[in-house]
Amino acid sequence: MTRDVKEIFGGALAAKVRTLAPSMTRSMQRVAETVAGDPAGCAALTVTGLAERTGTSEATVVRTARVLGYPGYRDLRLALAGLAAHQQSGRAPALTTDITVDDPIGDVVSKLAQAEAQTLADTAAGLDTVQLGAAVSAAASARRIDVYGVGASGLVAQDLVQKLLRIGLLAHAHSDPHLAVTNAVQLRGGDVAVAITHSGSTGDVIEPLRAAFERGATTVAITGRADGAVTQYADHVLTTSSARESELRPAAMASRTGQLLVVDCLFVGIAQRTYESAAPALAASYEALAHRHR
């Protein structure tokens, strides 16, 4: 592999750090910049060692790992070790666990399809249908449904809302954290708030869910971490598969397949419960859209 290609992939983590830096504290930025600048050196450090090297605390190191998209420091350390190995060996870096930059496009299609199928199977196997049924019941009779998500999870939030709107339910998707909280404080008993966050620790999603929870709304968390911070404000928790990731396909992207499955299960369940009103609303939306394109 040429040096240019290695530099491109080695710079992926640095690019992620630059993008996320504004949302980090100064101490977290020091940790993030250190791991991006020296993946091999940091991969050899324990959480205590990295905290000492950066003049921060172990808690700061763990928080930084989560902001970067990893469930914990162990996962970040493994990713750093993999990146360092690729840089040192010159092997083609992995885009996913099984795909490298040298794979023919036909192999990419086949391997991605297999990975997506496994994510769906894992999510379905781990989904608590009792929790799902309770969330469906609450949403089917809700006065209003608010859905919170940022980044890739924000796209999933929009997907859920557009489905709910088409069957006549009052629903809103919020990716702006200020608008999310502003709307959340208006919720009350009989309303439903849904938070979507793969890591379970996204503050911009947790804060509005907390506000909704404290005002008596029924709250639902769709997350890849059953022990994530978001669950402490969730009446119902729907878990997704902890999708495997790599530098160019981080968890925020890989997890979306599982999230979309959970969203579809939630939507279909709601449509079943509200069929008498959902069917004509859906027909009306089809007619409106068909008329628009005539």
Image: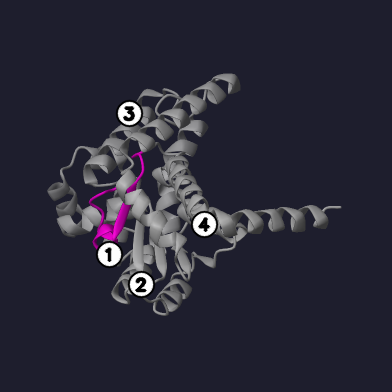
Q: Which x, y percent locates residue 183?
A: 45, 76
Determine which residue is flagged by label 3.
85
Q: Nearer the viewer, mark 3 or mark 4?
A: 4
Residue nearest the viewer, comparing 169 with 123: 169
Mark 1 burial class by Cα count in 10 Å: few <14, some 14-19, many 20+ = many
Is residue 7 in the magenta section? no
**Residue at figure coordinates x 35%, y 47% from the top left:** 36
Viewer-side label of 3, 2 = 2
Give the residue at x 32% y 77%.
Answer: 215
Of residues 164 and 79, the one nearer the viewer is 164
Instruction: Name the kind of residue labelled 1 in the image.
Output: Tyr
Where, by quadrant of the figure, is residue 25 drawn? Answer: bottom left
Q: Secondary structure at mark 1?
A: helix
Mark 1 or 4: in front is 4
Q: Earlier in the sequence, mark 1 or mark 2?
A: 2
The x, y position of residue 38, in whole percent, is 30, 43
Is residue 114 positioned above or below 244 on the image? above
The Cα atoms of the two marked residues, 3 and 4, are separated by: 54 Å
Q: Earlier in the sequence, mark 3 or mark 4?
A: 3
> What is the CA distance from the residue labelled 4 to the residue labelled 2?
24 Å
Quadrant hosting residue 241: top left
Mark 2: few/some/many CA within 10 Å (<14, 14-19, 20+)? many
Q: Earlier in the sequence, mark 3 or mark 2?
A: 3
Q: Which residue is mark 2?
A: 212
Q: Which residue is mark 4?
A: 274
What scheme was used to colour the molecule? one colour
